[in-house]
Image: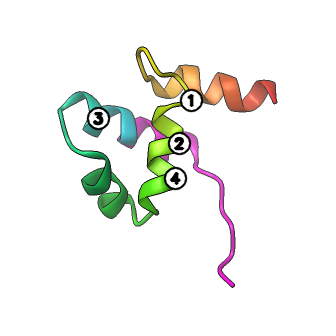
Amino acid sequence: MGKFKYLTYDDRKIIEKMYKSGMSTPKIANALGKNYSTVYRELHRCPKDYTADKAQADVDSK
């Protein structure tokens, strides 16, 4: 079984930049070397307007 790793703040900044440029979720996941579902769930952490800062604040609050 693979080793589970959390997304870092830097990963979230990359996701934010790629997502706002219009890149698809599978392409973002491929660029990061992450599973599609990981990126999909991450983007739904802040459904209206994803930002790395909001997502990291959500993670830190849990």
Q: Is residue 52 magenta?
A: no
User: x, y (%) of residue 14?
Assistant: 37, 42
Q: Are marks 2 and 4 in contact (CB under 8 Å)?
A: yes
Residue with the mark numbered 3: 19
Closer mark to the observer between disc 2 and disc 3:
2
Question: From mark 2 to mark 1, how far is it between C-alphas?
Answer: 6 Å
Name the disc covering residue 41, or none: 2
Q: Amino acid at mark 3?
A: Tyr
Graded by Cα atoms within 10 Å as few (under 14), some (14 to 19) or many (20 or more), the crowding at tag 4 reads few
Label placed on residue 45: 1
Vertical order, 30 against 44 (above or below): below
Query: Where, quadrant-wise, is the N terminus in this rendering?
Result: bottom right
Residue at 18 percent across and 34 percent down: it is: 22
Q: Amino acid at mark 4?
A: Thr
Direction from residue 7 to residue 33 in the image, left or right: left
**Element marked by disc 4:** helix
Q: Which is more N-terminal, label 4 or label 3?
A: 3
